[in-house]
């Protein structure tokens, strides 16, 4: 063999080695986050149970059901509709791992855009993982992308036409779950996921549905509850109740003409009172400096201190930042307040949750205090998994 | 339709990868060979659906 041929073979081996390393990392991105269901979980299924087209696909995300001993209504909470908005996912995970339902039923989908957890947004320097400290040890979770992974839905059109309204949005929104409701059974990957979630709300007879999000601190719709008009009174009561807890939330009405959003389509297309909550995530801000897992958890950024000083930030912001425990605490306290309003509106279908951490408890104990530890976790404490 | 487009794309990448591999073997200068090898990396990743 000539020397340049031998060198070519060596270089092909180098290419293969690089591909193996990349494959290893790629496989790790597809590994599901560890969620350790607590004693309140009575049934675990997947989104595929509500729409057969998702069976066996990367969209088949877990669905947890927590059934109370007493009859009542059904609350559905979604986290991870946007996998780069960590507090929504973590608040939903706290519900799965920590709380118990006394009356009624709770359905939780912590990672609604399952496919979006397998990649990160390009050009954002986002980390793949972040770590939450526990009282003993720590838990690591995936940080994902706002949209579904393009490997599951490709290519993006130049213009995204929302079904069934025909509304036109930027092509990239075709992979954004919160622009694709109500979806369709034979549509794109994202539309099929949206359809399956609508099926959860319809077939399970959900009375109140809450979608948990985060947004950039300069985004005007932040620290807010967005309510479909059916639930305006419930949301107004919740905002007042939160004010008594010294938590400022604004109340936004779900825009009627902006189609595809969870609160709009869930409220229009199902019997549920539909809400969306937003907290402030520095990681999503356009003004942020160094983008690290620590920034996601601490929410402390020097650039945002300067931005806050000149009034460019829509949330209270100082050197203590907006740490993850405060953002998760806001979501959990918000859920409690919305439930309080719902229970006043529909006393015959009350929903009562036990062990729901308050904002103050999250702020003082951290999120990790309400997550199970992999080292001490016993699956026997969970409900049946069919 | 999207599936057909996808496999056409993968086919183009595979042909391009083959051409570059042939060039890699016919090239005598080591730094040009290295350049070909580096071009091959993303093509191999795309063919294997790794990205």
Image (cartoon, helix red, strand yellow):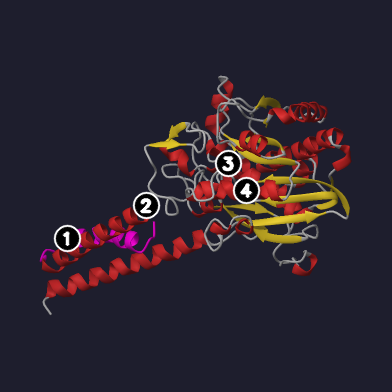
Chain on which label 2 sits: B
Let me know if marks 3 and 4 both belong to one chain.
Answer: yes
- On whether residue B39 falls in the magenta region, the answer is yes
Specify the quadrant that holds the N terminus of chain A.
bottom left
Residue A197: image tag: 4
- In magenta, the rendered stretch is B27-51
CA gap, disc 3 and disc 4: 8 Å
Q: Quadrant of the C terminus of chain A?
A: bottom right
Chain letter of the residue beneath label 1 in the structure image: B
- Looking at the image, tell me whether mark 1 or mark 2 is earlier in sequence order: 2
Residue at 37% across, 37% down: A158
User: A186 or A209: nearer the eye?
Assistant: A186
Q: Is residue A317 above or below residue B27?
A: above
Q: Are marks 2 and 3 on the same chain?
A: no
Q: Which residue is mark 2?
A: B2
At mark 2, the secondary structure is helix
* Mark drawn on residue A182: 3
Based on the displayed image, in which of its 4 quarters is residue A249 positioned? top right
Separation (CA) of disc 2 from disc 4? 24 Å
Q: Residues within 10 Å of mark 2 (few under 14, many from 20)?
A: few
Q: Which residue is mark 1?
A: B31
Above or below B37: residue A229: above
- Label 1 SS: helix
Determine crowd level at label 1: few under 14, some 14-19, many 20+ residues with C-alpha closer than 10 A: few
Is A194 colored magenta in this rendering? no
Q: Residue at x 86, y 33 (%)?
A: A344
Q: Earlier in the sequence, mark 3 or mark 4?
A: 3
Image x and y of residue A126, in percent? 49, 46
Can marks 3 and 1 be said to lie on one chain?
no
* Residue A366 placement, left or right of A61: right
Nearest the camera: B50 or B6? Answer: B6
């Amino acid at each position: 063999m000539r020397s340049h041929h031998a060198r070519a073979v060596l270089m092909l081996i180098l290419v293969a080695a690089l591909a193996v390393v990349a494959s290893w990392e790629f496989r790790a991105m597809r590994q599901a986050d560890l969620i350790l269901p607590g004693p309140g979980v009575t049934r675990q299924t997947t989104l595929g149970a509500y729409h057969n087209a998702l069976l066996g696909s990367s969209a088949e995300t877990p669905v947890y059901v927590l059934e109370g001993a007493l009859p009542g209504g059904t609350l559905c909470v979604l986290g991870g509709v946007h996998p780069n908005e960590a507090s929504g996912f973590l608040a939903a995970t706290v519900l799965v791992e920590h709380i118990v339902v006394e009356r009624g039923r709770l359905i939780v989908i912590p990672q609604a855009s399952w496919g979006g957890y397998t990649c990160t947004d390009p050009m954002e320097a986002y980390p793949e993982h972040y770590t939450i400290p526990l009282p003993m040890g720590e838990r690591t979770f995936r940080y994902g992308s706002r949209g579904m992974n393009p490997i599951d839905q490709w290519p993006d059109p130049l213009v995204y036409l929302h079904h069934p309204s025909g509304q036109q949005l930027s092509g990239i929104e075709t992979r954004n779950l919160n622009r694709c409701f109500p979806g369709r059974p034979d549509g794109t990957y994202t539309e099929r996921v949206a359809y399956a979630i609508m099926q959860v709300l319809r077939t399970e007879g959900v009375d109140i549905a809450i979608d948990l999000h985060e947004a950039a601190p300069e985004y005007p719709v932040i620290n807010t509850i967005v309510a479909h008009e059916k639930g305006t009174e419930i949301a107004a009561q919740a905002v007042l109740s939160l004010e008594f807890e010294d938590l400022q939330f604004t109340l936004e009405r779900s825009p009627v003409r902006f189609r595809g959003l969870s609160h709009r389509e869930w409220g229009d297309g199902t019997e549920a009172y539909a809400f969306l909550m937003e907290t402030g995530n520095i990681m999503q801000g356009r003004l942020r400096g160094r983008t690290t897992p620590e920034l996601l958890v601490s929410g402390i950024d020097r650039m945002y201190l300067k931005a806050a000083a000149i009034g460019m930030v829509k949330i209270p912001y100082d050197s203590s930042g907006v740490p993850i425990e405060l953002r998760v605490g806001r979501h959990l306290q918000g859920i409690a307040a919305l439930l309080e309003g719902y229970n006043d509106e529909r006393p015959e279908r009350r929903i009562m949750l036990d062990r729901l951490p308050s904002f103050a408890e999250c702020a003082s104990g951290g999120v990790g205090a309400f997550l199970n530890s992999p080292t001490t976790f016993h699956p026997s404490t969970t409900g049946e998994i069919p | 339709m999207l599936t057909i487009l996808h496999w056409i794309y993968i086919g183009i990448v595979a042909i391009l990868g083959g051409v570059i591999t042939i060039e890699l073997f016919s090239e005598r200068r080591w730094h040009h060979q290295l350049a070909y090898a580096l071009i091959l990396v993303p093509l191999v990743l795309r063919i294997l659906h790794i990205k």
